[in-house]
Every structure is written in structure tokens, then in C-alpha cells.
Image (spheres, rainbow, N blue to C red):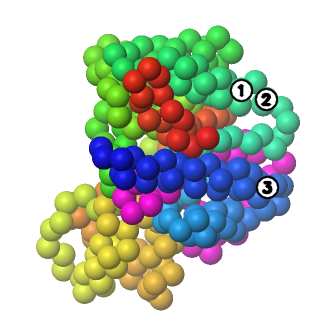
């Protein structure tokens, strides 16, 4: 990675950090989920970037992959544990960061569990350390607080235009031998739960990305393909984003269904803790340096 590319990742991280901190004021009882998501995405635009993925607003036992539906009327409740996950695409330089806010005031220790796991993981990342060792530290920290890590959600390597670039950081101890290398960029992403410690797919899918181009029959599908490629490339997008560009809900839904069936698109089902336990999340994007790591989203 040359100096210009590295500086672009740093700038993407700085912008994501500003949006993350500014967005916290939006997390209030009665606030519309759709308004929160669209406001955060507008903040990203005002920073000169694009969303690296649709803003996730995952509440209570929902761990990931929920973004509000088009014209959703849902709002926050005073018992909600709210996870906001956001990222910025700055001409291919990607950043990813997340936080949890407890509107009930009853889950402070659960929130601290994911935050402390993130801090402890970052403190031990340096060249030569195996990702499985970091997973063990995350697991030990979360279990030490009396909760469970979510075993089938992970942190992930980031490369230019690739949000998930193959290598993962587990949230539990593993024998994965990959060792951090100077210049690596990763999203470190602990999840803590009061539930089962693993997530399951729900039927609801609001987020998609291009998987493998193929022939499609419907004219509307071909229009949506063109729109997706031009506007989102290979990065994830929300159905609500597409609905803003195409007037018919039925045609958009039918087109997305055809594109999923033909494996042109992949869907990201909403993920829920299998035991329906509460879930907290904390996340930073880091750059591995010669003697440690630099937090890009701080």
C-alpha cells in the first residue's frame, strides 16, 4: 500500500469517527429508525464519502444486518439496546465502526463487555500475533464480565473496495494461524450477549450486494442491475435505496427476488441471537504498524 492509499484510509477513518460521534445525539426514545439511518447516511455524504454499507440499527436481540425498510414507521423505545454500525467509502478506502447505546439504563455491564473486549483486542494486535489469539482475548474478556461472545460473527480484513477481504478475527479462541502483518487493515468487532452466543438468520432481508453476474429475464431486473452497478458497485446496498429510484414496490421486490434466485445478488438476512438474548457491539478499524496498531476510526 503506497502512502497516498494509506492516507486515504486514514481520512476515511477520521470521517467515520466524526460521523459516529455526531450520530450518538440521534439515539433517543421516540426517534424514527428510518430518520436515524437516513440522517447518518446524509452525514456521511456531507463528509464527502458514500456509505460503505447501509447504516445498521440493530436493536436488543438483533445482532446485525438490520436497516430500516422503505417508509418504516418504527421508532426507538425506552427499553431498547441500540447498536449503530456505519462505514464510509472514500473512493475505495473503507472504514467500519460501531457502538451501542442502552436506552434502558439497565445493561451498562453488557455494553462495557464489548467495549472492553475491543480495547483489549486492539492492545495486543501487532505483527506476528495470530488472529486466533486475539479471538481468545475477546472471549476471555466477555466471559469475564459474565456474558458470551457471539461465536459466528467476526471482525474482518479490509482492502481497497473490499469490506470483507477474506481473513477474519474470531470473537472466540481459535486455531486460525493467520498472523497480522504490518500494513494490514482490519475491522475489530466484538459482540457480547446474554443469550446463546451464536446468531441465526431471520427471513427478513433488507441488505444486498452483487454476487455473480448472470442473465436475467425481467426488464425491471436489468434496470435495477444497471442502477446498482453504477451507484454501489460491489458494496452492500439497501432495498430502501433502490425503492427511492423505482416507483413500484412490487416490481422492485420481484426484481430483487429474481436477482437472488439467479445468484446475481446475495442477501444478508437479519441476524438474531439464537437464544433471543440482548446483544452489544463495539467496533474500530485499525492499521497494523511495526510495533502495534493504529486505530483509524478514533
Q: Nearer the viewer, mark 3 or mark 2?
A: 3
- Residue matched to label 1: 112
Q: Which residues are magenta?
A: 66-95
* Nearer to us in this view, 6 or 226: 6
Mark 2: few, some, or many residues within 10 Å (few <14, many ≥20)? some
Q: Residue furthest front?
A: 3
* Distance between the alpha carbons at the discs numbered 2 and 1: 6 Å
Mark 3 vs mark 1: which is more N-terminal? 3
Quadrant location, the C terminus: top right
Residue 255: tell me if it is visible.
no
- Residue matched to label 3: 25
* Distance between the alpha carbons at the discs numbered 3 and 1: 19 Å
User: Residue at left 70%, top 50%?
Assistant: 21
Contact, CB < 8 Å: mark 2 with mark 1?
Answer: yes
Q: Is residue 141 above or below residue 34?
A: above
Task: Determine which quarter of the picture holds residue 175.
Answer: top left
Contact, CB < 8 Å: mark 3 with mark 1?
Answer: no
Image position of 76 (left or right of 144): right
* Nearer to us in this view, 54 or 95: 95
User: Residue at left 38%, top 16%?
Assistant: 129
Amino acid at each position: 500500500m503506497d502512502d497516498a492509499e494509506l492516507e486515504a484510509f486514514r481520512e476515511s477513518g477520521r470521517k467515520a469517527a466524526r460521523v459516529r460521534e455526531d450520530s450518538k445525539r440521534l439515539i433517543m426514545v421516540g426517534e424514527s429508525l428510518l430518520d436515524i439511518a437516513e440522517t447518518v447516511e446524509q452525514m456521511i455524504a456531507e463528509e464527502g464519502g458514500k456509505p460503505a454499507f447501509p447504516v445498521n440499527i440493530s436493536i436488543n436481540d438483533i445482532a446485525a444486518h438490520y436497516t430500516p425498510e422503505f417508509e418504516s414507521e418504527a421508532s426507538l423505545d425506552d427499553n431498547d439496546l441500540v447498536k449503530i454500525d456505519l462505514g464510509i467509502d472514500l473512493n475505495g478506502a473503507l472504514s467500519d465502526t460501531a457502538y451501542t447505546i442502552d436506552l434502558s439504563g439497565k445493561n451498562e455491564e453488557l455494553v462495557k463487555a464489548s467495549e472492553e473486549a475491543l480495547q483489549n483486542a486492539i492492545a495486543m494486535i501487532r505483527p506476528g500475533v495470530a488472529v486466533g489469539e486475539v479471538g481468545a482475548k475477546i472471549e476471555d474478556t466477555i466471559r469475564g464480565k459474565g456474558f458470551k461472545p457471539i461465536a459466528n460473527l467476526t471482525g474482518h480484513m479490509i482492502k481497497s473496495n473490499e469490506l470483507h477481504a477474506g481473513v477474519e478475527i474470531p470473537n472466540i479462541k481459535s486455531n486460525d494461524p493467520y498472523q497480522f502483518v504490518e500494513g494490514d487493515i482490519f475491522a475489530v468487532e466484538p459482540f457480547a450477549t446474554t443469550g446463546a452466543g451464536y446468531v441465526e438468520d431471520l427471513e427478513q432481508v433488507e441488505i444486498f450486494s452483487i454476487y455473480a453476474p448472470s442473465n436475467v429475464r425481467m426488464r425491471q431486473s436489468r434496470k435495477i442491475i444497471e442502477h446498482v452497478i453504477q451507484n454501489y458497485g460491489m458494496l452492500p446496498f439497501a432495498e430502501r435505496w433502490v425503492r427511492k429510484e423505482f416507483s413500484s414496490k412490487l416490481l422492485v421486490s420481484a426484481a430483487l427476488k429474481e436477482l437472488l434466485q439467479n445468484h446475481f445478488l446475495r442477501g444478508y438476512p437479519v441476524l438474531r441471537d439464537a437464544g433471543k438474548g440482548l446483544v452489544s457491539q463495539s467496533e474500530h478499524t485499525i492499521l497494523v504498524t511495526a510495533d502495534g496498531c493504529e486505530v483509524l476510526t478514533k
